[in-house]
Image (tube, rainbow, N blue to C red):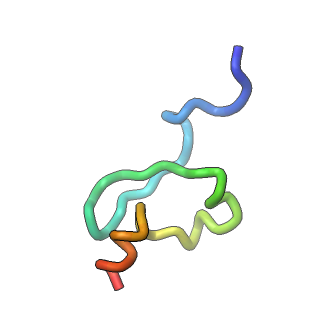
Amino acid sequence: MPNGVAKRDLPSKTCPVCGRPFAWRKKWARDWDSVVYCSDKCRAVGR
């Protein structure tokens, strides 16, 4: 049995630029509250 959390149980948000949902990533653990965009491309368009 693998350790950890299933992907379906992770928190998710919707990107305001493309409208796609994106899930929590370990590299975003420290600043998940400030993550708004799903990718660098959407961040560049959203500014």
Q: Which quadrant holds residue 30?
A: bottom right
The furthest residue to the front:
41
Q: Is residue 20 left or right of residue 3?
A: left
Q: Is residue 11 above or below residue 33?
A: above
Q: Is residue 27 above or below residue 17?
A: above
Q: Is residue 5 above or below residue 46?
A: above
Residue at image coords 35%, 70%: 41
Residue at image coords 53%, 48%: 11
The furthest residue to the bottom:
47
Q: Position of residue 21 (x, y in %)?
A: 36, 52
Q: In this view, does 43 lie to the left or right of 11?
A: left
* Quarter occupied by the C terminus: bottom left
Residue at image coords 70%, 20%: 2
Query: In this view of the protein, which residue sits in the foreground, 16 or 44?
Result: 44
Residue at image coords 58%, 30%: 6
Q: Where is residue 28 in the image (x, y as percent from the top left)?
A: 62, 60
* Quarter occupied by the N terminus: top right
Number of disc labels: 0
Q: In this view, does 9 lie above or below 39?
A: above
Q: Where is residue 4 in the image (x, y as percent from the top left)?
A: 70, 31
The furthest residue to the top:
1
The furthest residue to the left:
18
